[in-house]
Amino acid sequence: MEGSERLLPKGFPKLKNDTFLRAARGEETEHTPVWCMRQAGRYLPEFRETRAAQDFFDTCRSPKLCCELTLQPLRRFPLDAAIIFSDILVVPQALGMEVVMVPGKGPTFPEPLKEVEDLLKLRQKVDVTAELGYVFQAITLTRHSLEGKVPLIGFSGAPWTLMSYMVEGGGSTTMAKAKSWLYRHPEASHRLLRLLTDVVTDYLVGQVAAGAQALQLFESHAGHLGPEQFQEFALPYIRDIARDVKSKLKAEALSLVPMIVFAKDAHYALRDLAQAGYEVVGLDWTIQPQEARAQVGKGVTLQGNLDPCALYAPKEKIGELVKKMLENFGTQRYIANLGHGLYPDMNPEHVGAFVEAVHAHSRHINKHG
């Protein structure tokens, strides 16, 4: 391993642009900060070039490559935050499961969890530094390499979303196998979700120790659950992660970084999510900003929620949509983003138009009202 990959998580360069962190904490900002989920992605030709002929998870295990991929969108666009290049499915790998990325199909588990007895195959105690230290090294290297330009976000999948992949064996339109576990094996489901919660908590704390300045929890499959199942099998673990991460950060004398929860399609749970211990609640594009604000109140920051497909529109139209979004959300206690990740066939110039429109319109609104 190269010496640059063994940099220590200390002596980081001074942060020059803290707009994202200020907005996350509810402080006033001169402009609305903006970043994009999956901003380090296949829509960038340089990303495709860097990743060419490289196995996906081998890439995730290379701190040097993760750093390069994380920095690429920052070289193109004046984004207000970086998010470390990695994948939520490194957590099931840390539990001992095999995950492969199949071209044209996506993540696949050759041996998914089928029976309750399969839980015994999982590591019951996970040393996150031993299993996921490559992510921590990537974060430390990237934090140094950013040279204080913008804050670095770390992340993890939430327990239900991770469980759904582990039982389904990959993506699914219905999550029927995973949901059947919730109905047929509720106790075993809770055992698995508790195990995942403990690992995710340690993983997120480790990311902060490595240099992450904010954390996002992705509950990407929330929309497959109804309100009752979400209340029983998702929300308690989302709450526990926020509480336990913060208490462990305090115990280890680490910075209490802002935490974001993004539960896609969980409109029915916005009030609960706003009270779950996170500074920021992320929104998908299917909810009106005013409705979301009415539900969460003024005590949390909102993040989102432009339809990613809006970036297929002409640049002028993107500007109009951004202006409307900012007027609906307001420019304060707000972080602009898409309602989901960038798609591989998007034009980088349109991503740039989105970022620049957020800055220009929010500055104008802040100045002129």
Image: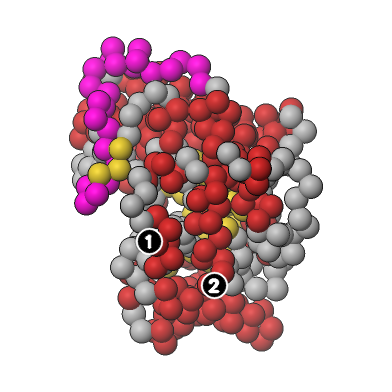
| Residue 77 counted in the magenta span | no
Number of on-image labels = 2
Horizontal side of 355 relative to 247 (left or right) equals: left
Residue 307 visible here:
no
Q: Residue at x 76, y 55 (%)?
A: 13
Residue for badge 1: 48
Using the image as rendered, state which of residue 144 and residue 318 is in the foreground. 144
- Extreme residue in the front direction: 2
Q: Quadrant of the N terminus?
A: top right
Residue 178 % position (x, y): 26, 31
Q: Closer to us: mark 1 or mark 2?
A: 1
Within 10 angstroms of label 2, few (less than 14), some, or many (20 or more) residues?
A: some
In magenta, the rendered stretch is: 103-126
Q: Which residue is mark 2?
A: 77
Query: Relative to 130, does residue 327 appear above or below in the rendering?
Result: below
**Residue at the spot 46% in from the left edge and 82% down from the top edge:** 319
Residue 311, image quadrant: bottom left
User: Which residue is located at x 56 percent, y 33 percent?
Assistant: 133
**Dominant SS type (magenta):** loop
Left or right: 307, with 103 as reference point:
right
Q: Position of residue 264 (x, y in %)?
A: 39, 50
Q: Quadrant of residue 136?
A: top right
The answer to which of 281 and 344 lies nearer the viewer is 344
| Residue 73 % position (x, y) | 51, 65
Residue 79's disc is none
> Residue 174 lies in what quarter of the image?
top left
Q: Which residue type carries mark 2? A: Phe
Report the amino acid beneath label 1: Arg
Say which element carries label 1: helix
